[in-house]
């Protein structure tokens, strides 16, 4: 199988949802909707590259919401219509020459990895396919006077969702021909492909894969998210490293000037290491040494950002969210308090949460023990996660 890419359409203004920012950047369950969407694709093992399409004015919001996620290409600017935005994303992907492309709305943050897998398989099988769900209610047509015209056979109706999947050359060509013909009125990419003569198949969608459009949608989403994420987990982490010759230490992803350095196989960031173990502990997925063995030379000198990014992606791969990250540093020096806010901001950016969900504290050991003698530094961490309830 060749490269599988995803275009995430996030250039809309989302005015019907209200609020001071576009709807895709509003939070649901403590996380920006667009981050949940991006994480679903970047964390999927069969997706190779994720191409965001955003409004240029939203660049700061996008950077804050997408920090630490893997597989993301540099976002490109969208246009006045969804169709123009999708074409911009497709053109940006040409250099990757993908075999398949999935096109998804940023404001559909609740899709599962299973849905992405079904989409990829349908793309392999048919070249053009869209997820659809069965219509549960009776559907009737009406005239201008609200008089019923006919009752439709709902067994032949489907509510269409995204991600819609296509052979990349096929959908890029269809978009280009539509643009050349002055057609910019297609409501989705499947309609455009159909206009181009392509047969489009339906595969099974998900009722949870709703599009957030109005303020009521966000209110319902909060309730559903809270009910779905009923499995609250807590994990703890501990890390210690010895001081050695050097001129700085890494703490919480921040380089802090100091008269000593810290020894360790990677950059020896005790704060991030303790947080990684706390998250993995809450997931019951081993510890940092299991996933990043000190004996493996590829991790020598590695930035610990990569380890925390991995742990946070494991949370999202299981459909969960990070509720709180709390860390305490124990050392006589360097002083942590002048760098506390920078550390909180950096950890929040890596984890993809707001800074008010990250606590950094510091204390000394009153000159007692190895920390008191200035021989090393300790960090202790706690992570609180919320995962989908899977039964007792």
Image (spheres, rainbow, N blue to C red):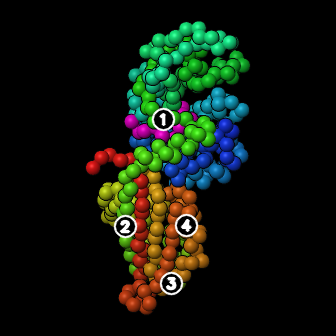
Q: Which label lies toward us, 1 or 4?
A: 1
Tell me what residue is drawn at x 46 percent, y 56 percent. Answer: 322
Labels 4 and 2 touching (C-beta < 8 A)? no
User: Which contiguous range is marked in magenta?
Assistant: 103-114
Residue 377, by quadrant, is bottom left
Where does label 2 land, which residue? 236
Q: Which residue is mark 4?
A: 344
* View extreme (top): residue: 149
Numbered marks: total? 4
Q: Is residue 349 visible?
A: no
N-terminal-most mark, 1 or 4: 1
- Rendered residue at 27%/49% (across/down): 392
Can I make out residue 213 in this image?
yes
Residue nearer the viewer, 348 or 109: 109
Q: Which residue is mark 1?
A: 209
Question: Disc 3 and disc 2: Cα gap in Å?
Answer: 24 Å
């Amino acid at each position: 199988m060749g490269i599988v890419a995803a275009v995430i359409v996030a250039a809309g203004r989302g005015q019907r949802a209200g609020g001071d920012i576009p709807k895709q950047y509003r939070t649901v369950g403590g996380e920006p909707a667009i981050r949940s969407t991006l994480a679903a694709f970047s964390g999927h093992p069969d997706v190779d590259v994720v191409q965001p399409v955003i409004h240029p004015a939203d660049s700061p919001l996008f950077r804050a919401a997408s920090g630490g996620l893997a597989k993301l290409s540099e976002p490109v600017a969208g246009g006045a219509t969804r169709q123009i935005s999708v074409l911009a994303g497709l053109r940006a992907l040409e250099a990757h020459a993908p075999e398949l492309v999935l096109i998804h709305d940023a404001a559909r943050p609740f899709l599962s990895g299973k849905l992405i897998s079904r989409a990829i398989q349908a793309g392999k099988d048919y070249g053009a396919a869209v997820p659809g769900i069965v219509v549960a209610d009776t559907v009737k047509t009406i005239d201008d006077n609200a008089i019923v015209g006919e009752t439709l056979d709902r067994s032949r109706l489907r509510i269409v969702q995204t991600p819609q999947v296509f052979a990349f050359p096929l959908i890029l060509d269809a978009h280009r021909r539509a643009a050349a013909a002055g057609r910019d009125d297609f409501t989705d990419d499947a309609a455009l492909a159909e206009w181009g003569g392509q047969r489009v198949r339906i595969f099974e969608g998900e009722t949870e894969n709703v599009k957030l459009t109005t303020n009521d949608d966000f209110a319902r989403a909060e309730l559903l998210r809270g009910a779905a994420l009923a499995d609250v987990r807590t994990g703890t982490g501990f890390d210690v490293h010895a001081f050695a010759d050097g001129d700085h230490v890494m703490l919480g992803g921040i380089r802090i000037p100091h008269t000593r350095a810290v020894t360790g196989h990677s950059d020896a960031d005790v704060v991030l290491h303790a947080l990684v173990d706390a998250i993995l502990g809450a997931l019951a997925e081993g510890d940092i040494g299991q996933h990043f063995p000190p004996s493996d030379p590829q991790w020598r000198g590695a930035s610990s950002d990569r380890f925390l990014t991995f742990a946070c992606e494991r949370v999202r791969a299981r459909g969960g969210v990070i509720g709180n990250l709390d860390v305490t540093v124990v050392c006589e020096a360097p002083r942590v308090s002048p760098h506390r806010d920078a550390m909180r901001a950096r950890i929040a950016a890596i984890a993809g949460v707001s800074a008010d969900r990250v606590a950094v504290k510091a204390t000394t050991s009153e000159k007692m023990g190895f920390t008191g003698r200035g021989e090393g530094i300790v960090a202790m961490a706690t992570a609180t996660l919320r995962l989908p309830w899977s039964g007792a």
